Image: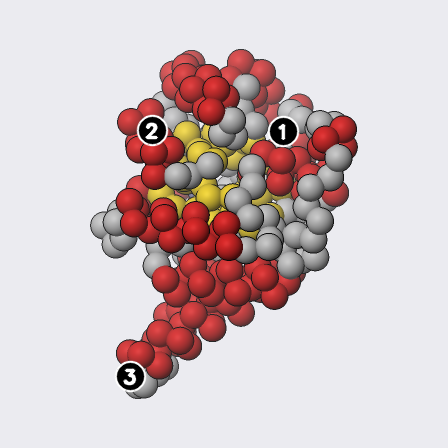
């Protein structure tokens, strides 16, 4: 069923597990992930973003995502990832996304607040929850280069940012990066802990592929309720493709199965398995965060 990401994440935050946000852009990813979701009885966030539009026409793919979500007994949110401006977000809403991220984290603080607040005001009228980012993770690049100019989330500014913008969910920059880590991830959990003490909204960990299971579990304990995974799904697919000489028809089935297996591992690591059963609690319980 299609549900609100805000409600889904407030429940996860309260119960100390995280919901997987799988960034997907093809049939193998969509159906592999949903097989894992239904097998593990987990809530899930199906996400898509501007980085995939060269591969997939979102006008059609959004319909596949939304229809697959509606067909499931499990709670599913369909989320636009890293929307840079209102034009992109308006198109995503028109396509049927019921949750969005505005990412103006590359701007200065005041401009990030202004752009984010504008999007929150529009989305609130439509009942669409909004994620935003403070600090700046940035695009895929060599990890050592990224760290040399990294903008970590400032805990005090995070409190001000959430209060002034009214965002539902906050993405943090704590040494995490997009793509494959070219050296050991340097995740600063002290910053995460301070941010979680300053804000009440659920936190998000982007670029979680390649971060150790131990760090992932600690981040969940510190208030992360949404964890973004893309690269690990791609790596699972490439493992099959690189070691295979089967016809494409058969190969595609094996890729879907490999993605299902990797998604299942992540869901269990995040502790959301079994949490998709009876997802709707009385309103009074959900309103407590
Ligand atoms: Zn991201």
The disc, 1 or 2, on the residue closer to the chain's N-terminal end is 2
Q: Secondary structure at mark 1?
A: loop
Which residue in the structure is indicated by mark 3?
247
Q: Is residue 261 left or right of residue 61?
A: right
The disc, 1 or 3, on the residue closer to the chain's N-terminal end is 1
Badge nearest the viewer, 1 or 2:
2
Q: Are marks 1 and 3 in contact (CB under 8 Å)?
A: no
Which residue in the structure is indicated by mark 2?
90
Please identify the quarter of the rendering in which residue 282 is found. top right
Which residue in the structure is indicated by mark 1?
201
Q: Is residue 177 left or right of residue 56?
A: right
Please identify the quarter of the rendering in which residue 94 is found. top left
Please identify the quarter of the rendering in which residue 36 is found. bottom right
How far is disc 1 from disc 2 in space, using C-alphas?
24 Å
Ligand 1: does it lie within 8 Å of the C-beta at label 1?
A: no
Q: Can residue 215 be seen in this snapshot?
A: no
Count of numbered tags: 3
């Amino acid at each position: 069923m299609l549900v609100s990401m805000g409600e889904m994440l407030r429940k996860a935050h309260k119960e100390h597990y995280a919901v997987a946000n799988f960034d997907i852009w093809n049939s193998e990813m969509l159906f592999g992930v949903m097989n894992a979701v239904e097998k593990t009885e987990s809530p899930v966030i199906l996400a898509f973003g501007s980085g995939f539009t060269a591969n997939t026409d979102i006008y059609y793919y959004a319909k596949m995502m939304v229809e697959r979500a509606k067909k499931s007994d499990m709670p599913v949110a369909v989320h636009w990832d890293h929307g840079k401006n209102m034009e992109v977000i308006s198109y995503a809403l028109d396509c049927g996304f019921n949750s969005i991220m505005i990412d103006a984290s590359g701007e200065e603080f005041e401009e990030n607040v202004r752009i984010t607040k504008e999007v929150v005001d529009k989305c609130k009228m439509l009942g669409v929850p909004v994620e935003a980012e403070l600090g700046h993770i940035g695009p895929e690049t060599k990890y050592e280069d990224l760290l040399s100019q990294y903008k970590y989330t400032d805990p005090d500014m995070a409190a001000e940012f959430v209060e002034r913008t009214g965002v539902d969910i906050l993405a943090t920059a704590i040494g995490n990066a997009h793509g494959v880590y070219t050296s050991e991830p340097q995740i600063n959990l002290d910053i995460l802990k301070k941010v979680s003490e300053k804000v009440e909204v659920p936190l998000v960990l982007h670029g979680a592929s390649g971060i150790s299971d131990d760090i992932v579990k600690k981040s969940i304990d510190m208030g992360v309720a949404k964890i973004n995974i893309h690269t690990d799904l791609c790596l699972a697919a490439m493992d099959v493709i690189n070691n295979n000489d089967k016809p494409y028809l058969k190969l595609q089935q094996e890729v879907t199965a490999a993605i299902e297996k990797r998604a299942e591992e992540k869901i269990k690591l995040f502790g959301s398995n079994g949490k998709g059963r009876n997802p709707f609690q009385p309103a009074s319980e959900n309103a407590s965060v």
